[in-house]
Image (tube, coloured by chain):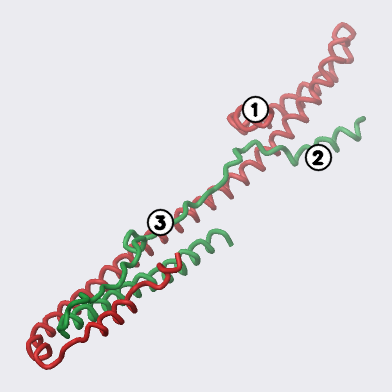
Amino acid sequence: MKKIIPLLILISLVGCATGPKTNVVMTFPTAPQDLTTTCPDLATVDPNTEKLSDVLNVVTANYSQYYECKVKVDAWIEWYNTQKSINDTVTK
Amino acid sequence: MFSWIIQNALGTIPTWTWPALAGASFVINLLSGILSHLPQFKPWHYFIKPLSWVGILVGVFMYGGAGVTVIYQEALKEQQAKIAVAEQASTDANTAIKTKVVTRVQVIHDKQVIYKDRIKEVTKEIDKDCKFDKDASKILNDAAKNPIKDTK
């Protein structure tokens, strides 16, 4: 009995964890508002127009539209890569 | 229920309680040894001795537990600090991206205004010499339509 008790004390040193079992949660980042709107459809030419200037206006507006959407897509790629690398610093 | 008692009731007891309990139990254990030599207190000895052993065991066990808890809480704090830094970095990155998008879109809009002005300048000349065929405008409009929408 006298040999067992010190052994029991030794074993009991491992203890029982009474701390709160709190999960540390990182909130999912919210993307910038500008990126969450969809790209509009391309503008179309008035079907009855014969003026080349009208066509030019529509075509240049559509080019601008494309570049605006490109900016958004590029920003999404950058956003994802940045947020992923930030997330990796916490999870790895 | 048991885990609730462990987490909420035992977790609130200060750490020093456990070595104090173990120490006190040890002293009682020694005293009970003395009591065993006194005939009038000998019956008490049989009761106090095992109780003191239980006190020592519980005290040491819970003190060990408190040590583990401290380690857990340190790890928790470390992780929380990491997350706070990451969340700040995430917010900063969002702000930087948002600023970049706004700036670039503004550049595109400014360019668009320039192109509109340039078209205005030459409208008379190009409309005088060129006529745009309606079939051409139909092809252009058809091409401008989103082909994915048709497949929905």
Bin the neighbour count of mark 2 within 10 Å (Cα to Cα): few under 14, some 14-19, many 20 and up: some
In the image: residue A91, left or right of residue A28: right
> Which quadrant of the figure contains the C terminus of chain B?
bottom left
Q: Which residue is mark 2?
A: A11
- Which mark is first along the chain, 2 or 3? 2
Rendered position, A36 above or below A69: above
Q: Position of residue B126 (x, y in %)?
A: 12, 90
Q: Residues within 10 Å of mark 1 (few under 14, many from 20)?
A: few
Q: Residue at x 33, y 59 (%)?
A: A33
Q: Is residue B35 left or right of residue A14?
A: right
Q: CA distance from mark 3 to mark 1?
A: 38 Å
- Same subunit, labels 3 and 2: the answer reads yes
- Asked if B150 appears above or below B116 in the picture, the reply is above
Secondary structure of the residue carrying tag 2 is helix
Q: Which residue is mark 3?
A: A30
Residue at 41% x, 69% y is B150
Q: Is residue B16 above or below residue A27?
A: above
Which element is circle 1 on?
A: helix
Which one is in front in this view, the residue at disc 2 or the one at disc 1?
A: 1
CA–CA distance between discs 2 and 1?
23 Å
Q: In the rendered structure, the residue with mark 1 lies on which chain?
A: B
Which amino acid does the dot numbered 3 rest on?
Answer: Thr
How many residues crowd around disc 3 within 10 Å: few (fewer than 14), some, or many (20 or more)?
A: few
Would residue B54 appear left or right of B151 to someone viewing this image?
A: right
Could you give the CA–CA distance between mark 3 and mark 2, rounded to whole angstroms? 49 Å
Q: Amino acid at mark 2?
A: Ile
Q: Position of residue B9 (x, y in %)?
A: 61, 27
Front of the two marks 3 and 2: 3
Q: Quadrant of the N terminus of chain B?
A: top right
Please name the residue that numbered disc 1 is placed on: B5
The image shows residue B70 at horizontal and vertical percentages of 61, 43
